Image (spheres, coloured by chain):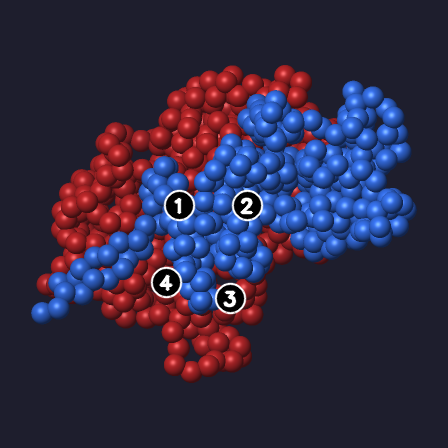
Amino acid sequence: MIEMRYPTVSRRTAPLGWGSMMVVAGAIALSLAAGAAMLAAHGKAPLTGIWLLFYGGFGSGWALEDSLLKAIPIFLCSLGVGLAFRLQVWNIGAEGQFALGAVGAAWPALTFPQLPAILLIPAMMAAAMIAGGLWGMIPGLLKTRLQVNEIIITLMLNYIGILLLDYLCYGPWKDPVSFGFPMSPTFSPHAVVGTIGSSRIHWGLFFCIGFGVAMWIFLRFTRLGYELRASGENPLAAHYAGLPYRRLVVMVMVVGGGLAGCAGFLEASANINRLQPSIMVGYGYTAIIVAWLARLNPLQIAVAAYLLAGLRVGVENLQLDLQVPAAFGGIVEGLILLSVLAGGFFNHYRLRFRSRS
Amino acid sequence: MNSPPEAIIRLEGISKSFGSIFANRDITLDIRPGRIKALLGENGAGKSTLMSILSGRLRPDEGRIRIDGVPFAALSTRQSIDAGIGMVHQNFMLVEAMTVAENIYLGLRHRRVLSRAQMAERVRSLAEQYGLYVDPEARIDSLSMGERQRVEILKLLIRESRVLIFDEPTAVLTPQEIDQLVSAMRQMAAQGKAIVFISHKLGEVMTIADEIAILRKGAVVAEMPAAAVQSTAALARRMVGREVLLRVEKPAVEPKQVVLRIETLSDEVLDRISFSLRQGEILSLVGVAGNGQKRLVEIVCGLRAPGAGKVTLLGRDWGAFFAARRWEGALSYIPEDRQRLATCANLDLTDNFLLTTREGFCRGPWLDRTEAAAKAAELVRQFRVHPSDPDTRARQLSGGNLQKLVLAREFFRRPRLIVAEQPTQGLDIGATEEVWSILLKARERAGILLVTGDVQEAVTLSDRIAVIYGGRIVDLFSAEDESHLSRIGALMAGISG
């Protein structure tokens, strides 16, 4: 007699705890396996490909540094969108807010290049965060005043923000000696955030630590942080308890925009030293994946931001060595997001195989 | 009664524990066709756990479940459905944005495609057959709790379930609706269905059930035919293990200033509602669910703006009152829907306590969570909420315990106006009495608007009773006015004069 085993699903009575890390690890493994299959289908050696991916992202001191450098803007953007997601406000506009941040930072850098760094750097940062914050405020106000869907507005504002940046690089702010390339003049040394010691890592890393800790303190110890957590958990109860839901929505959009703007400032100042269209590489979208991977927790966002930054660096390596299209990285990112979201099922349910005699 | 029919379901020595707590301990029960079996027990006696085991949502640690004689160590949800077991949950499981008919057909496997009209027709005839009147085309979110329950029952009837389990089915119903439900239950039993109903209301258990099983602390402490029970008091004693008084003292309190005044309040639901409520009195608003109570409460509690007319709370106009929104010494609202409106399921007890009391624990922008946690722990102990660990998530609390948490929080605010909506729904006798005496005591410094479908509760607690029907207050009288009291049922049904 053949014994039949039936899969049965039951709701977990106790939280999964550390097991949820295993779910995330499993989801990432599954996505990489699917990535390997894609490589094989492309006629590339799959195992070599995955090894190159790892080696490229985390295999050398240079790679580790490069990953950390890319993790900085991803972390800042993700911290911002994660805050909005906590309130169940779907801000996918970090990309555009990042663009506005870069534009905002470039304005004082190009207008007052002679200012000493002690004044110019804070001015750039403030301008970047205000520009990003205002860009985030638009969908926030539209949502709370006119009940316009924030997903659509934030997405559309991304394109407008990027086009604004392009326009400035092609037009008013174009470097007269750039041989026609769309880019602003190089920032003066006063406008550049320096590196830490002899490494390539810039001081923006400390901004990340500062903002991350501030976010943790805000969510845990302030009244507004509590109101945000409660409203996000149950908007109906927020209404019942008279929580300032609309103000919170605008606030998370402004703060999220400000953080993405800060990321744009750091990229423009520390990494590229000018404003140019190639500053936009999709950190704002990766940030959304990072926020979900990290389940909106600031510390976990740091870890996930580093992992996905490593993936980006690894894919660059893969592109060079195996001539894999650049889209491969985006596909693997997407696979990771989908499998982590699907894996969320195991946080609430358990699957068992049981035999019926 | 001749020899009992063969059991559809036989539970043999079922045990289930959560951590160190036994929810069910060595339970043995027979569920027979054509019988109405009551499972009687206080909050946390293990009734819901037992039903979750039957519906395949929980796996017992020990024991066996026999279905038509075939033994199972545990049921899957699918096996439970295939065995014809169906549940009417206390918290309805309906898709609010869909219509009644759509909800009923949701998840049902059908050989051929049905049109909307056919679905509605089928639902309508089934509803008529059992006297469970509900409009098949109505959207769920427009229905009252009573109507939603009928949809839940129809969902099972259309699936031809053999065993129908009702979890506190009368908790949300008015007397007329209860009568309809009881006759529907009897009809179902007469057709050979097995009915199990979970309750802690002694009176209705006595009138409805054929057999009564009493659960205490997870174990079946007694099982008997309903005919063998001598008195309600005897039943109560066996259920709680102590004598309970079903009467509460109602000390006289001198009514003082007006805390709530409503003048000709009208909108698309309400029709020229006028009354006033004074500190020191309990005014009960009784009526069949869906007659405008919900709308009135939403307006009084600031969830919805008033239409025409005037609402004055604690001497201030509606707009001014809710713009100021003081957390203490003002308005407390104890809603019927504790799970979704009054609490956040995924937050812990301290965070849930802070939901309406947060302003009391603020130091500038900071929230003193340590102080709040200490206060919450103290109140949780005082109100005997189980589990009492403040780190527990709200969703881990049973309905009754969640209500105690809400009450603890709302009374901590020292309100001067209380709106209590079905405050004892789903609570056991002990807890009900506690809530009643808390409300009577709170009356000394507050005016209480008690919205209830339980006439007994209204009569027990109120100083005055208002009957609402079709969005209008059809009568308002003193709770001592016997001649009016006898006509409450008719008034609630819309029969006046």
> Which chain is represented by red in the image?
B
Q: Residues within 10 Å of mark 1 (few under 14, many from 20)?
A: some
The picture places residue B76, in percent across and down from the top left corner, at: 27, 58
Q: CA distance from mark 3 to mark 4?
A: 22 Å
Q: Which residue is found at the position 41% from the left and 68% from the top? A: B107
Q: Amino acid at mark 1?
A: Ala
Q: What crowding class fits label 3: few (fewer than 14 Cα within 10 Å), some (14-19), or many (20 or more)?
A: many
Q: Is residue B491 above or below residue B262?
A: below
Mark before the other along the chain sequence, 3 or 4? 3
Residue under disc 2 on the same chain as residue under disc 4: no
The secondary structure type at the circle numbered 4 is helix
Residue lying furthest bottom: B112
Which residue is under mark 4?
B183
Image coordinates for residue B324, horizontal then vertical, percent: 73, 29
Q: Which residue is mark 3?
A: B100
Disc 1 and disc 2: Cα gap in Å? 20 Å
Tag 1 residue: A25
Chain identifier, blue in the render: A
| In this view, the mark in front (1 or 4) | 1
Q: CA distance from mark 2 to mark 4?
A: 71 Å
Q: Is residue B127 above or below residue B63?
A: below
Labels 2 & 3 near each other (Cβ < 8 A): no
Q: Identify the residue under disc 2.
A: A313
Q: Quadrant of residue A263?
A: top right
Q: Secondary structure at mark 3?
A: helix
